[in-house]
Image (spheres, rainbow, N blue to C red):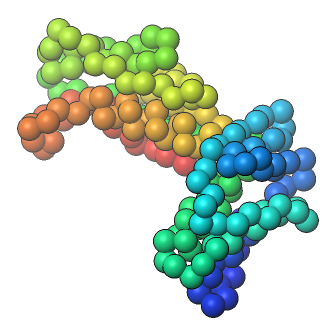
Amino acid sequence: MFTEKKCCKMAERQVEIPKGAKVTLSSDTITVEGNGKKIEKLLDLRSVGLEIGDGKVIVKSVDEKKKSTQTAGTIAAIIKNMVLGTTQEFSYKLKVEHKHFPLKVTVKGDSVEIGNYLGTKSNRYAKIVQGAKVDVKGADITVKSNDKNAAGQTAANIENASKQARLCDRKFLDGIYIVEKP
């Protein structure tokens, strides 16, 4: 999807834009549109240069420093995922596991409510990032989004909400775990 050309230690990466997709840049915001979907990201573009044209986006580091070349690679990967998001949906699957106390997981508004965690009366909440959809069916939870970062962060929020500090993971298996990711 992207190629890398190194010249004098300066990184240049190219991201192919498929037909029907449109990439625009205004200030520090990159917008990718295609198939009726629109994904926007606000990025720090101080150490990279972007060129859009000829069906590809060229990301170049502005100097030879290691951090600049790494930033160029990261931004190229983000743009690649944004382009992929216009054609497909990213899906994370989580599994509810319990040994002693059955967990009750429900979606309430923009958060996921986890009840009866290790037998406690108080509920735990995980934030659903804007653009992500969460579906709970029994012990299976599916997080879907066209934005890979939104789907991944929502899945991580759910997994982290069901962790307990100072308890051994080998003995206390109760929790929600990511079992499949794109």
Horizontal and vertical percent for residue 86?
75, 42
Residue shown at 30% from the left, 35% from the top: 160
Q: Is 121 placed left or right of 81 in the picture? A: left
Seen at 21% across and 30% down, the residue is: 174
Q: Residue at x 62, y 82 (%)?
A: 10
Q: Nearer the viewer, residue 111 or 120?
A: 111
Horizontal side of 54 relative to 67 (left or right) equals right
17, above or below 153, in the image: below
Residue at 66% in and 37% down: 146
Q: Is residue 87 visible?
A: no
Residue 158's place in the image compared with 20, above or below, is above
Whether residue 120 is visible: yes
Quadrant of the rendered image containing residue 2: bottom right
- Quadrant location of the N terminus? bottom right
Farthest residue, direction bottom: 8
Residue 38, position as x, y percentages in the image: 76, 36
Q: Is residue 139 left or right of residue 44?
A: left
Q: Quadrant of residue 165?
A: top left
Tell how many labels: 0
Q: Nearer the viewer, residue 100 or 117?
A: 117
Image quadrant where residue 178 sits? top left
* Coordinates of residue 16 in the picture (x, y in percent): 79, 63
Reply above or below: 164 against 169: above
